[in-house]
Image (cartoon, rainbow, N blue to C red):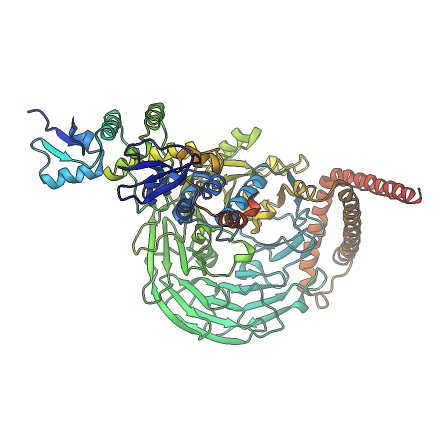
Amino acid sequence: MARPKVTLVSSDGETFIVEQRVAERSITIKSAIEFAGVDGLTADIEIPLLIEGKVLKKVVEWCEHYKTTKFPEPDENQVDVLSRPPVLTKWDNKFFRLCFEQDMMFEIIMAANYLNINQLLHVGCTTVANMMKGNSTEQIRELFNVPNDFTPEEEAAIKREDRWTK
Amino acid sequence: MMIANATGDGVYQVVDQLGNTVVSGLKKPVILRNLVHVNDLPNEVLVTIFSNLDPIQLNKVRLVCKRWDFVMNDKQTWTNSFSLKFHTPRIFPSLSNSSNWITEYFTRLHYLKKWKKGIALHNSYQLYDSEYRSDDSYLTNFQVNNRLGRLMVFSKRFGNITSCTLKNGKAQSFIPGGITTAFEIVSHCLNPDYLLLGKMNGQVVYKNLSTANPYSTSSSTKLIRPEINEDSSPIMCIISNPGASAKYKHMDIISGSYRGSLEIRSLQGHLFKSFTLTNEIILNIASDFKKWVIINTNTHIHIIDLINLTIVKSFELGITIELGDTTSFSYYQTINESKNSLDVDFGDFNIVVCHVNTIKTYNFRDLNNILQRSLQLDNSKTIRRSTMQGVLPNRSGSSRNNNIVGSDGLLFANLLSDDSIIIWNIRSGNNEGSDIVPMTTIYPELNHGKSYHSLQHTLNVLNLPQITSISLNGLFIAVGGYSGVCRLYDVYTGLFVRDLTVKFPKTFRHMYEQVIPVSQIILNEDIDQANGIVVSGDSMQYFQFGEASLTSLNQNPKKSKRSQVNSKSLDTKNKIREQEEEYYSDIHSQNESRKLFEKFNGEEYNAEVENDDDISLAIALSESYHDSKVNSRANSQNQEDEDLQLALELSRIMHEESQNNSQVFD
């Protein structure tokens, strides 16, 4: 018998049929599957998600690509062990550059957060951080289209707070 | 759907379905679709993003908008950011003791640069008593003597004390034991002004070092605890308040005996309180001399409140302590070697006990609920050395402050029998029964240079360890091997940083001919000073990183030249004075020894007139006389160079001064 498939349904009705292990990259989906059947997946299952089709497509693409990779499990109790930044592969870089060009960067990160795909979330966040690196405050505002909501006085106050950084 | 409205002047705003302005002041038109903006992300995701940034970059990012500034204040952001930059865990010891992460950042960068890249200065010198140092105690003070520091060495084997300047080994003075035969000493405690000896017969002897000198020993000693018939068991350990003064009658001395009698006394010998712990052997005592005394016997730990003078808590150790063969001649000395180690972190109420292959911590913040943590090593490994991190001078004795950067952690290192080192945090996690998780494990490789192969051979034949000593501060761990070889590793990454020592000069021939372990490494607790001392055998090496680069940066060139000249001439004068003193003391000791030689090698020897003190003094002097000859040969080359330099310096100063004068006249 063929392995049961998981069908992911996007908010706008698009469907993605994936292997169970691909779907289970997401802790949210994994617990949904566990909820559906204690004895493991026996029949095909359909999971509706509150994610737009084009974003879900990207997320599925990422999960498919890394379906055989084992990522280190984060352990909340191990406070003494250092948290290391995720290593970005060339494929990751290309993937996220494309996402950014299509204005889907933050949607992917939101989706990763919602679906609880730890590695994707961290890789995404690292990419965003890398984009901020080496830029001035003003450049960052422009890049991410963030309006400056500080009054000049407030801004000066914060600057004064760490004036010795100059 | 969101709609972007142009409000004129090229400024755009985004309005939601109900017509409320969501974002205003945009300079670009927003693409009209269901766009997720960076500020739609939840706070924890923003924290994850910012965690990837450098602290400097964080400082720029916090100015972007109010929300980002708010998120930036989250401790998690900075902890992660630090972790990325410095590889620090969630809890780590702060170097700046500030609650401002940026301050900590710059302090850390500054220290890292100084220790890693700073210009190194090394001074090698030998102690004149030339003893093989195994279980001696060392007392250092880096601050005194115009930053030359002071080193005091108490040799337990001979009962002698040698002291000299820390930086260059000048102005050595020597106080021979004399008061007691060495094997009678079971425990001791060294202080800059006095020495306490706990003896086999239960006596405690106080020796005043400020009045003691090589020429008379009898006047300066005092019996603090006389021999008591009922309890004449050996004094297993003795500690004293480092800040004690003989003028005041305070609780300054705590001693514990083999039969479990614990006594708290003043320096004059006044007994404040004694406790008897029947059927227990007191092995270690620790105290902050303010509130707590922690005693560790072979079965229990007792906590004494020093204010009310009562035992407030007693609990079982949970480890069996093997004490060796009771019939052996040197049984009590063996106990000192085989007993557990006891370290107490009074700032956060942690007791650390290490024995054979067990590490245990007991937290006594709540006396009714002692929290234990432990680490059990494989049976193949044993703990060889245990060291608590040196605390910055301005923080020693103060309690833990959770608000400062890194939650005020405290590191502990254990050297294991397989030549690996584990470093862990005493102050992380107080869950009952949880395991101690090593933060870093280091397998150091020491570079013994040319002699590597022959040394390895000797070590293998004699079954000696590769690593002989360790010492750590909040940033680095120093690892010592043989013949003065010592390296520095980063405590967080476990990576090699730099060689702490240089090769000893060729004149220290024994360093190359014998296998001499590094017996002690002492790092200055003030990390900013970046100095310390490495002891191997009878030779010391002082190191200092990056002092010169700092002083030359400050003033403008002309002024600095002037002040440099002044400080240099002052230094030179000090040097001359020091050498003069040394010369006179040499002459004096030579005269004395000649007299004694004549006395004892001559025609008559009157046993009634002479006493033991004189004999031991004569022996000690003849030894030191002999050694100083050997040393002087070794040092003569250096001495000559130094003299030459001094002369040059002086002539240069004279020349410059005359030039300055002539300028004034012009």
Q: Is residue B193 above or below residue B481?
A: below
Locate residue A38, reporting x and y percent. Answer: 9, 40
Tell me if B128 is positioned left or right of B483 in this view.
right
Q: Is residue B603 above or below residue B314?
A: above
Q: Quadrant of residue B535?
A: top right
Q: Is residue B479 visible?
A: yes
Rendered residue at 18%/30% (across/down): A21
Tell me if B282 is positioned left or right of B130 in this view.
left
Q: Quadrant of residue B613?
A: bottom right
Judge by depth and name the residue closer to the eye, A76 or B245. Answer: A76
Locate residue B468, reporting x and y percent. Answer: 50, 43
Judge by depth and name the residue closer to the eye, B144 or B171. Answer: B144
> Quick one: quadrant of the C terminus of chain B?
top right
Give the residue at the far right of this rendering.
B665
Locate residue B616, reporting x and y percent. Answer: 67, 59
> Quick one: quadrant of the N terminus of chain B?
top left
Give the residue at the far front of this rendering.
B8
Locate residue B499, reporting x and y percent. Answer: 56, 36
Tell me if B167 is positioned left or right of A126 in this view.
right
